[in-house]
């Protein structure tokens, strides 16, 4: 963590965070060990020896396990230039390679004013009407360099992505080789302050608007590692899809400000809705947030499982068949939930909300009572129960204008089992 690095370096946390931002959120240092992608000093010695013996380029490549073009390029680029014949020497070739790899280099956008202006204009493009007029968009907040602005306050721009700019250069300047730059060089000019070519506030014009780059290792992390093969939605019984048998539920969270949330449960057949109260844990707002620390917001894995089990066990056993949830980590303790309630849990695929369409539609209806941008912790359990009752007593077109409560009560009466509670 940055705090640990600050303590190790003997500086304050704000200074460490400032250094981290200036580096663009990525480590600018090169590894001390030469990557296998590049030729090593030992390989260059072998090339020089075999070349002196008259071994062909393809034979050298075969012996080293390299591509022939790699050897050919090495002999052409790193040969000694102080002799009449291009004589390849291992020491000279190694010096040339280390000289080229020396960092930092002067950025191309710093030395080429025309290229820099082209890139900057297209990163900060504006929205034009059909007649050429500039359309006035929302006034964005002042750039602070720490994080991307709120989505409602983002500048209204028609910016090109760095990849679009890099490829468009070859179309606009087909014969000018100086007007060439890779999209990675543009990203580095934006994120790494030491490159000094582009204004850092232009990152707000990018699609994501991030002030820092996300490390590749983080993007490769599997956020839904708790989803086992047997709990995938593809393993769900076929009877769930036809909605013929009540007792199969869909669930998710409605998220509000200040890390507040409300759990929602919707029965697929009758559309009967239950809301789960998720109060914040003791110490929220008082205990500093720590990485891998206790989940005090109210919807951690243990808290969520307990609240969900308490709610669903109030139902008759005939209405507890399965639960389809989003792939969020709030239900990573699903194995214990299944043991305690007997309800099998299945997870929808990532970025596939249509697989829980009933729940998504219901959450949209609930937003009438819990608008986005509000703190949901203000509602207590009694108020959530009242809102759920209001939703369950509204007629629904998909139920033939019956209410969800009437549809569920009709199913319970059809069971004709004495002692089974109804929704009256």
Image: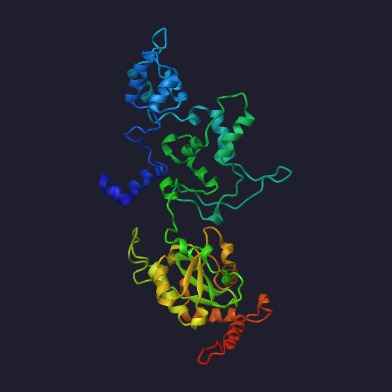
- Total marks drawn? 0
Horizontally, residue 129 falls left or right of residue 82, namely: right
Q: Is residue 157 visible?
A: yes
Q: Residue at the location (43% across, 78% down)?
A: 310
Give percent across and percent down for residue 358.
Answer: 59, 70
Above or below residue 181? Residue 152 is below
Residue 386, x across and y down, in percent: 53, 81
Query: Relative to the observer, which residue lies in front, 86 or 98?
Result: 86
Looking at the picture, tell me which residue is in the foreground, 279 or 62: 62
Q: Quadrant of residue 355?
A: bottom right
Pick out the residue farthest to the right. Answer: 131
The part of the image, by quadrant, that contains residue 284 is bottom left
Residue displayed at 60% across by 49% down: 156
Residue at image x 43%, y 39%?
A: 192
Residue 419 percent location from the top left of the image: 50, 92
Q: Is residue 279 visible?
A: no
Is 316 located above or below residue 361 in the figure? below
């Amino acid at each position: 963590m940055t705090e640990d690095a600050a303590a190790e370096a003997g500086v304050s946390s704000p200074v460490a965070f400032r250094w981290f931002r200036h580096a663009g959120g990525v480590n600018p240092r090169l590894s001390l060990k030469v990557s296998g992608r590049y030729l090593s000093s030992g390989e260059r010695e072998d090339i020089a020896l075999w070349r002196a013996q008259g071994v062909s380029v393809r034979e050298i490549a075969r012996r080293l396990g390299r591509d022939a073009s790699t050897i050919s390029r090495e002999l052409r680029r790193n040969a000694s230039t102080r002799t009449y014949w291009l004589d390849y020497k291992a020491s000279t070739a190694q010096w040339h390679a280390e000289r080229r790899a020396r960092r930092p280099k002067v950025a191309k956008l710093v030395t080429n004013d025309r290229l820099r202006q082209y890139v900057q204009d297209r990163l900060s493009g504006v929205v034009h009407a059909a007649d050429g007029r500039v359309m006035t968009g929302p006034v964005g907040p002042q750039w602070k360099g720490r994080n991307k602005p709120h989505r409602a306050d983002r500048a209204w721009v028609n910016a090109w992505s760095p990849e679009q700019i890099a490829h468009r250069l070859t179309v606009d300047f087909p014969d000018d080789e100086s007007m060439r730059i890779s999209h990675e060089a543009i990203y580095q000019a934006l994120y790494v302050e030491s490159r000094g070519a582009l204004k850092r506030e232009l990152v707000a014009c990018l699609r994501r608007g991030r002030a820092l780059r996300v490390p590749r290792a983080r993007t490769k992390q599997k956020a839904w590692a708790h989803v086992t093969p047997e709990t995938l939605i593809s393993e769900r019984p076929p009877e769930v899809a036809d909605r013929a048998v009540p007792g199969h539920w869909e669930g998710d969270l409605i998220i509000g400000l200040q890390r507040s949330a409300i759990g929602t449960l919707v029965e697929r057949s009758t559309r009967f809705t239950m809301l789960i109260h998720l109060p914040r844990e003791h110490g929220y707002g008082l205990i500093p947030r720590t990485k891998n620390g206790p989940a005090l917001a109210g919807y951690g894995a243990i808290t969520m499982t307990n609240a969900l089990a308490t709610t669903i066990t109030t139902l008759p056993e005939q209405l507890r068949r399965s639960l389809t949830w989003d792939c969020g980590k709030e239900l990573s303790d699903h194995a214990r939930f299944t043991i305690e309630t007997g309800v099998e849990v299945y997870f929808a695929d990532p970025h596939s909300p249509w697989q829980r369409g009933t729940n998504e539609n219901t959450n949209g209806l609930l937003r009438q009572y819990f608008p986005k941008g509000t703190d949901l912790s203000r509602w207590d359990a009694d108020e959530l129960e009242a809102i759920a009752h209001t939703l369950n007593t509204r007629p629904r077109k998909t139920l033939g204008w019956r209410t969800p409560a009437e549809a569920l009560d009709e199913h319970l009466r059809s069971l004709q089992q004495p002692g089974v509670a109804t929704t009256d």
